[in-house]
Amino acid sequence: MKAQVWQILENTVRALRPDIPESAIPSDEAVSVSRLATRERAFLAEASAVAGDVFDVALPILLDGYGDCRGAEVASALHRAVLGRFENASAACLEALLEKTESMAVASRRRLAHDLHDRIAHGIGVGIQGIELAELRLARGTGSVTDGLARAATSLTEVLDMVRELASTLRESLDGRSLVDALDHYLSSVAPPGIRFRVVAHGDLATVPRHVAEEVHLVLREAARNVLLHAEGATSLLVTVTVTEGELRACVIDDGPGLPDAQTLGADSGGLSSIRERTRELGGSVRVSTAPGQGVHLAVSVPLRMAAAS
């Protein structure tokens, strides 16, 4: 930030006096940025406030060094320099955000294609095989067709459930509900009878910015979905969301078999990389604890101030 202020000073001085020698330009030692330090990581959320602080820091330096210029002239030149600098920075930040958004959209499309191919197409294929087996037995008059048709019915029913789940995923995340209500609704619609689940909240969820709640909902839903798909033998699933001043913490805990190899946590195991990517975009972190036979404990932490600025 200090370098940014010094650059604005240089641009302003050159606008006031185009022929000024390099030695006459204030050095960066003249810049006191103590009041700017607290805003350095909140540029996007407080850009106008940061610009105002930069103006307030730079103006006295310029008036002190170039008192022969009219105050209005100095202020006008500084104003243009500040705006020019912040416009360029804002454009760069916007481009970076657009690139991140596109990257996440591509990842979502790939995940959808993966689910369509590996889960839905496979289930339809199994159903078709069951029907073909029944047709073959019926044509040959050998054996009962009941097993083949029952297998087909079971597989196609599972496919229907998968399609409904995907449709729910593609709809608006919270759909007007609170974060906890949306998670409870999702689990109520997809959790099998053999798994008991609870969604517990602590703190004031209303203080969480909506776009943060949307992303956290997707993260926790993906984590819960991993449990339902991969934690064979799991009987319980607990989701907790805790909001404190400046931070949101959430956990997804199951009593399944756990993961046998901690190294697999670095791969895209059941969408873990998607969970980490979404959390990272909010300035947060993900921690996974697991051991064979002891289930999986996934913890998410998001700093709300930084997330609100992203």
Image (spheres, grey):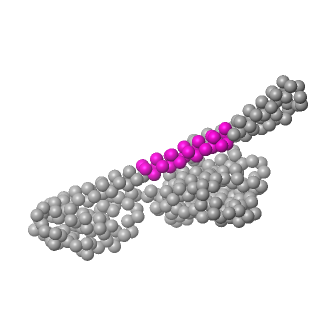
Q: Main secondary structure of the magenta part?
A: helix
In the image, residue 236 above or below residue 140: below
Residue 7 x/y as whole percent = 25, 65
Is residue 267 covered in magenta? no
User: Nearest the camera: 132 or 271?
Assistant: 132
Instruction: Work out whether residue 275 can be spotted.
Output: no
Residue 126 x/y as whole percent = 74, 37
Residue 250 left/right relative to 61: right
User: Nearest the camera: 135 or 277?
Assistant: 135
Instruction: Work out whether residue 29 can be spotted.
Output: yes
In the image, residue 121 above or below residue 142: below
Residue 88 x/y as whole percent = 30, 55
User: Could you tell me how many numbered marks the image carries?
Assistant: 0
Residue 208 x/y as whole percent = 52, 57
Residue 37 left/right relative to 124: left
Q: Residue furthest front?
A: 140
Identify the residue shown where x is 62% and y is 49%: 182
Figure quadrant of residue 273: bottom right
User: Nearest the camera: 57 or 146?
Assistant: 146
Q: Residue furthest bottom?
A: 29
Q: Residue furthest top?
A: 139
Residue 6 left/right relative to 167: left
Bounds of the magenta segment = 98-121
In the image, residue 220 above or below residue 148: below
Identify the residue shown where x is 54% and y is 43%: 109
Quadrant, the C terminus: bottom left
Identify the residue shown where x is 71% and y is 36%: 125
Quadrant, the N terminus: bottom left
Identify the residue shown where x is 69% and y is 46%: 190
Residue 209 left/right relative to 132: left
Figure quadrant of residue 286: bottom right
